[in-house]
Amino acid sequence: MNFIIWLVVGGIIGWLASMVMKTDAQQGMLLNIVVGIVGAFLGGWLISPLIGAGTINANDFSLAGLIVSFLGAVILLAIVNLFRRGRVR
């Protein structure tokens, strides 16, 4: 059951991050899930030590954990945009 919740929350976070970065029209549901989960790993690695909150990958479904995961997904999409287009939108 935790796995299904992890996928759903990862998909929502990836979708919200893609809307913020204006890449929503380029990616589907599966890529939104991947962006949310990989972004949560990135957020856990970069942001989590700074503020002391977990991510959705560490089963931390608190508000701070969701925000860290969301920020990691936004950073991931910014990095992808930087390499794909040569600039961040």
Image: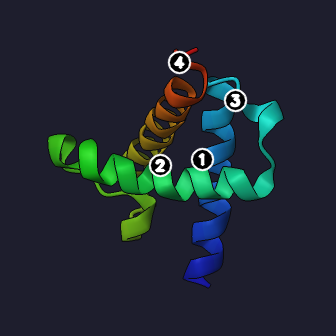
Residue that badge 3 annotates: 19
Q: Do residues under tags 3 and 4 come within 8 Å of each other at their CB atoms?
A: no
> Tag 4: residue type?
Gly
Determine the secondary structure under disc 4.
loop
N-terminal-most mark, 4 or 1: 1
> Tag 3: residue type?
Met
Residue that badge 2 annotates: 39
Q: Please state, as top left, top right, bottom left or bottom right, where the C terminus lies in the image.
A: top right
N-terminal-most mark, 3 or 4: 3
> Tag 2: residue type?
Gly
Q: CA distance from mark 1 to mark 3?
A: 10 Å
N-terminal-most mark, 2 or 1: 1
Give me the disc on residue 86: 4
Q: CA distance from mark 2 to mark 1?
A: 9 Å
Q: CA distance from mark 2 to mark 4?
A: 20 Å
Q: Do residues under tags 4 and 1 come within 8 Å of each other at their CB atoms?
A: no
Residue that badge 1 annotates: 13
Q: Residue at x 41, y 70 (%)?
A: 59
N-terminal-most mark, 1 or 3: 1
Which corner quadrant of the image does residue 60 belong to?
bottom left
